[in-house]
Amino acid sequence: MKESLKIFAGDLKNSFKDLLPIILVVALFQGAIIQAVPENLSSIIIGLTIVAVGLALFIRGLELGIFPIGEGLAIDFAKKGSVFWLLLFAFTIGFSTTVAEPALIAIADKAALISNGLIDAFWLRMTVALSVGFAIALGTLRILLGHPIAYYIISGYILVVIVTFFAPKEIIGLAYDSGGVTTSTVTVPLVAALGIGLASSIKGRNPAIDGFGLIAFASLTPMIFVQVYGIIVYTFMDAPSVAQTALSVADNAKAVASAYVFSAYDTFMALVGTIKDVMPILIVIFFFQYAIIKKPVAHLHKIITGIVMVVLGLYAFIVGLEMGLFPIGETIALQLTGMGNNLLIYLFAFLIGFSTTMAEPALLAIAIKAEEISKGNIKQNILRMVVALGVAVGISLGAYRLVSGDPIHYYIIGGYVMVIIFTYFAPKYIVPIAYDSGGVTTSTVTVPLVAALGLGLAENIEGRNPLIDGFGLIAFASLFPMLTVMGYGIHAEYYRKKQEKQSQLKGETS
């Protein structure tokens, strides 16, 4: 018990360190630029303390419950030797965890509104969920076959670009964003554990190279599926009559910004929403464990304790954010857009992108696994900072695009071309981690603040439509971390070779 408390105290200390950049950014803008003390300061402090406790619980729960059961299932499936059941499990995990994702529900409702009822929210959710199920199954098959991930991802990006030129403009931004909101905080570590466990149990596979990449597939395929769905709908269907909505555009935009993460507006419903998010995953896991593998879960009490800690940690995390960060973040975003200084907007976008990504639980989970699998060659803190830099650059560039009014797809296509070029030069071990980095950055912390910034800009800039221009920042936040992580890999490899050459020269001269 004493040892457990000591470990938790260490996790709590690290959580407060992770939140420090967010606190500094908010304090800087609130005190130096807006020059006003927030009315609910005590609530903000309490909320951020709850966030730190939630983050510590979440990480400890992952180590105890989610990682072991995910890797154990992958190993058992590999031993069973049934490709059919393994791919069905992968598909079911992808589909079941996506269809109930609160961020996806919000974006689907927004799509229905943008299209004047032409796009049906339910069928859009089904399209995205099917695409994620297909993605996880395809990614699992890639691990089994041992194919390089770059061939799949680059082909996917080329397909995204081709489809974009045929897709209606009303759906492009939403399609790009749908790739960023499908990977939830609980899904990411489980899918990562599945990939790493599978790669570890198959002879000839490298967990560092073959184990990562499933999240990248889950972020890519929705962009293709949603655009194809939009093409079909806009080509072959007539728009039905739509009842007048009581909400104004601005009110509706703010409501969607809140709905991006919350399934309800009070703390009790936040707990219910968290349990609902986790429940499909648990049902799938235990069904396949007992009905297909037909083997009891090892250390069941430990696994259950870990799962409970994950649920409580996420619950505390969401409640704390609602109390401490979201209100002030949205206020600052809206106040800055009203000040008319675009440079301040870009600076806020950069700093809030960096600081929120450093506190992102899904990224922390992936970084822990990357350090473990690489045997310390990839440092989790450096990886997180490199990813956070990518998000910061992406969101600030996305904010510039929104202010300038440029079409989003030119920027995204340019980004994909750079990803393909970087893939060619980056060392193999970093490429799958870089691809996954794009999917894990847009989750519990980042999405609502980014949504608030995008919608706030679109509401306050003349000639912008919040229903169309307000989306797209999430796509930028998903794209640029891939470039910064591969850039980090290229630099690290260059430095390593330089050191080796210097060592050889010293050996020859001595």
Image: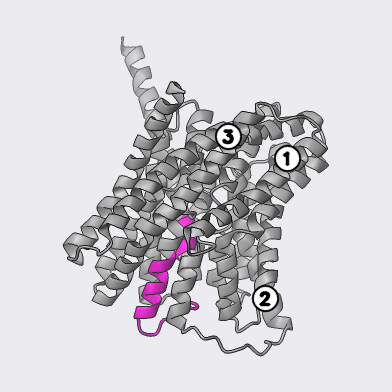
Residue type at tag 3? Thr
Residue name at image x 55 percent, y 45 percent: 311
In the rendered view, tell whether residue 332 sits above or below residue 503.
below
In the rendered view, tell whether residue 225 sits above or below residue 149.
below
Circle 3 is placed at which residue position?
305
In the rendered view, tell whether residue 361 sits above or below residue 170.
above
> Residue 286 bears which disc, if any?
1
- Residue 214 percent across, percent down from the top left: 62, 45
Task: Describe the element under mark 3 as helix, strand or loop.
Answer: helix
Crowdedness near tag 1: few (<14), some (14–19) or many (≥20) residues, C-alpha within 10 Å: some
Is residue 163 inside the magenta stretch? no
Residue type at tag 1? Phe
> Residue 120 bears which disc, if any?
2
In the rendered view, tell whether residue 426 sits above or below residue 470.
above
- Residue 25 percent across, percent down from the top left: 27, 55
Task: Describe the element under mark 1 as helix, strand or loop.
Answer: helix
**Viewer can see residue 211:** no
